[in-house]
């Protein structure tokens, strides 16, 4: 058995935790074919099978795979800490990051974990709130940087906006929901200050569709639970609708007006003294979303 390649081990951990090559590729910013190839290289090095696969799908870990996963986190943590300790020019300081729940993607936690591993002297504080609240807090100097959904509103002159990508929105409702055209629409939405909510209300009011708020939640999981239960209809990112949700109808099928997109962006207070820290955190976030 040859020595382990840390990059290959990192890929294996991503596959095991995400449960698919596609999910691992999104997490690591690699193509699915690259992820599959790296797993094969790792298995060749070890002379062991690490995953049980059926028709290209991951079923579960082999006994060897389970042993490797149990030890892989310690291996990667020691590796990353060693690299960080060899970085003679350590960046230090406290930085306050804001996340709106709707943009707090699971993969972002991995970017923040890498930042902490490579820069252990950086004191990171994360707060979740609505996009509107976060923009206000950044402009007031209560927060350094935030990842938000924006509808192209005006912000303070001291705020820099770095757009990551455009998020396409769609309506989502359970096929058995009793709403009919001409009736008041039961709306499931995030609190005031959310870009999804703003786009939903803009589309409905511009097209004369009456609505009433039946369910409000700051959690995307809460919104999805209400939709799948048939309580109402919600404006959600098209990319977030699970393919294994056959009872959910979306888009034009709902017979509702088209929704405008929102911009997922990093906003930061450029007047703060810790410019280097801001650039460091912004870079880590941008790299995570680069794919």
Image (spheres, rainbow, N blue to C red):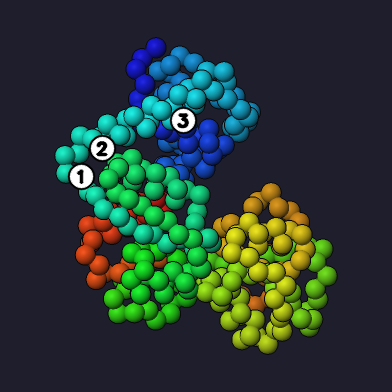
Instruction: Note whether 175 is above or below 200 in the view shown.
Output: above
Residue 278, horizontal then vertical, whole percent: 28, 59
Quick one: quadrant of the N terminus? top left
Q: At 44% from the left edge and 51% from the top edge, which residue is drawn?
A: 108
Residue 170, horizontal then vertical, whole percent: 61, 67
Q: At 27% from the left edge and 31% from the top edge, which residue is drawn?
A: 82
Residue 242, horizontal then vertical, whole percent: 64, 52
Q: Which residue is mark 2?
A: 84
Disc 1 element? loop
Disc 3 element? helix
Distance, label 1 to label 3, CA atoms, is 29 Å
Left/right of residue 147 with respect to residue 277 in the rendered view:
right
Left/right of residue 88 with respect to residue 182 in the rendered view:
left
Distance, label 2 to label 3, CA atoms, is 22 Å
Q: Which residue is mark 3?
A: 12
Residue 119, horizontal then vertical, whole percent: 28, 44
Sequence-first disc among 2 and 3? 3
Sequence-first disc among 1 and 3? 3
Q: Which residue is mark 1?
A: 90
Q: What mark, if any, has residue 162 been given in the picture?
A: none
Asked if residue 52 shows in the view, the reply is yes
Dots 1, 2 in contact, CB < 8 A: yes
């Amino acid at each position: 058995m040859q020595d382990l390649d840390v990059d290959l081990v990192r890929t294996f951990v991503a596959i095991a935790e995400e449960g698919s090559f596609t999910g691992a590729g999104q997490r690591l910013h690699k193509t699915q074919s690259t992820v599959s190839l790296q797993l094969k290289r790792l298995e060749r090095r070890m002379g062991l099978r690490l995953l049980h696969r059926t028709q290209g799908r991951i079923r579960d870990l082999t006994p060897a795979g389970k042993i490797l996963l149990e030890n892989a986190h310690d291996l990667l943590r020691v590796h990353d800490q060693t690299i960080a300790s060899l970085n003679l020019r350590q960046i230090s300081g406290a930085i306050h990051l804001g996340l709106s729940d709707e943009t707090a993607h699971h993969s972002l936690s991995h970017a923040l974990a890498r930042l902490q591993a490579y820069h252990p002297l950086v004191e990171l504080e994360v707060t979740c709130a609505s996009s509107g609240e976060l923009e206000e807090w950044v402009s007031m100097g209560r927060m350094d940087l935030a990842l938000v959904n924006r509808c192209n509103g005006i912000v303070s002159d001291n705020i820099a906006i770095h757009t990551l990508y455009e998020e396409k929105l769609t309506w989502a409702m359970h096929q058995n929901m009793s709403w009919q055209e001409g009736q008041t629409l039961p709306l499931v939405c995030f609190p005031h200050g959310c870009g999804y909510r703003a786009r939903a209300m803009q589309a409905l009011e511009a097209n004369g569709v009456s609505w009433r708020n039946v369910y409000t939640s700051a959690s995307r999981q809460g919104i999805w639970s209400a939709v799948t239960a048939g309580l109402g209809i919600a404006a959600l990112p098209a990319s977030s609708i699970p393919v294994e949700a056959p009872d959910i109808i979306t888009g034009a099928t709902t017979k509702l007006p088209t929704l405008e997109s929102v911009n997922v962006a990093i906003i930061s207070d450029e007047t703060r003294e810790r410019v280097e820290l801001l650039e460091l955190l912004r870079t880590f976030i941008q790299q995570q979303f680069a794919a």
